[in-house]
Amino acid sequence: MTRPWEWLLGTRYLQPTGQRGFVSFIAFICVAGLTLGVAVLVVVLSVMNGFEHELRSRILNVTSHATLMGLDGPLPDWRAAREGALQTDGVVAAVPYIEAQAMFASEQRLAGAQVRGVDPLEERQAVGLGRQLLQGSLDDLQPGSYRTVLGEALATELGVKVGDSVVLIAPQGSATPTGIMPRMRRFTVAGVFRAGMYEFDRGLALVNIQDAARLYRMGEGVTGIRLALADPLQAPAVVRELALSLGGGFYVSDWTRNHANFFRSIQMTKSMLFVILLMVVGVAAFNIVATLVMIVKDKQSDIAILRTLGASPRSLLLAFGLQGVLIGLTGIALGTLLGALISHNLEMLVHALERVTGQSFLDAKVYFMSDLPARVQWLDLLQVGGVAFLLCALATLYPAWRASRTAPAQALRHE
């Protein structure tokens, strides 16, 4: 009884009765539309967030945080550069590597890939690829053993398994009396890894760094130094400062630059989807206009009586504006909860649907992963809820203003 009468009036007109059943049903449809629109928007943004987070995690499990390479050919005096890197704040590990292109040939198949020469003991310090092995171990890549660890998709394409042999064909040739012949070496498959990204599972093979140096005739040189940082987000600044402290003359790169197109496209897609799906929320929000206009039209005589009893236009504006706000808040709250609930269980729902239909919705060759991750962020929830509430508030202005402008004498003329 202590609540303002504007609150009592606004909530009463939303309650279903025999005479207001249809109006209340339309209000329910508005709430359902808002709930569905907000939920879809939350789920889509969560999927984009999850895709970006999963992509970043998988990239950092396979590639280094930053690299320091020579401008022309092998890195000069790489041991001194490595010592300088290890003394730099934020650098956890610095390991040399050799990287080059090659062709792999099995008995009947041929596939191109990138060969990376690594030191098995130091590789675990730089990246987490050693934890992604399905078979074998990085310790099997001993100098002179000429063994290789292949990505899962590459091994499948070549039709080989652990223990089989493949021929590695280097693009550099050797001069012979019969002409230029490519350098070839038979390697034994010692392991298979699965990084979770088709780019690496199909296009990367690991060998011992000394075997790679002999095959590509690098001598004591290396392609560069791979850095592992305590904070991967600081990679661009740290590697640049390191190159300057070493006197310059280096080509520097980092994981954000190497995969910039991935993250740029994700952010662009996320922004476009937010705008497009916000239109769906806008349509549901502006249905409030129709609902409140029907209520105002149906209750003109009640409004006129209230005006004759002393109700001010401002009070009527608040009463009918309150109805739109309640509809909007209810739809936004239910939509946010539904969207968050679906997002947290999205992978389970997708896998269940795939089992029922017998089809895979995500092709790793196209989307770089076979799962559909979702990651709910509070900032996105606040952004979606704030914009949706703003649309709902705008939708209530005209009906509430129309109710406040009702003329008592004209409305009661035919009563």
Image (spheres, rainbow, N blue to C red):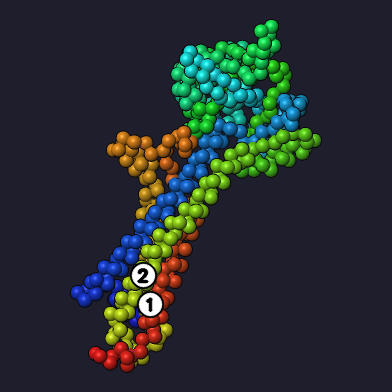
Image coordinates for residue 204, horizontal then vertical, percent: 55, 26
Q: Which residue is mark 1?
A: 399
Kind of residue sitting beneath label 2: Ile
Residue pictured at 77% horizontal, 34% vertical: 249
Q: In this picture, is 162 found above or below 248?
A: above
Taking the image as shown, residue 246 lies to the left or right of residue 302, namely right
Rendered-image quadrant of the C terminus: bottom left
- In-front residue for pair 1/343: 343
Image quadrant in which you'd find residue 13: bottom left
Q: Please tell me how crowded label 1 is: few (under 14), some (14-19), or many (20+) other residues with Cα within 10 Å.
A: many
Q: In this picture, is 196 found above or below 145?
A: below
Residue pictured at 73% horizontal, 37% vertical: 242
Image coordinates for residue 291, horizontal then vertical, percent: 32, 72
Taking the image as shown, residue 342 lies to the left or right of residue 175, namely left
Taking the image as shown, residue 80 lies to the left or right of residue 273, namely right
Q: In this picture, is 242 found above or below 331?
A: above
Q: Which residue is mark 2?
A: 288
Image coordinates for residue 132, horizontal then vertical, percent: 49, 28
Q: Residue furthest front?
A: 178
Residue pictured at 32% horizontal, 40% vertical: 353
Q: Please tell me how crowded label 2 is: few (under 14), some (14-19), or many (20+) other residues with Cα within 10 Å.
A: many
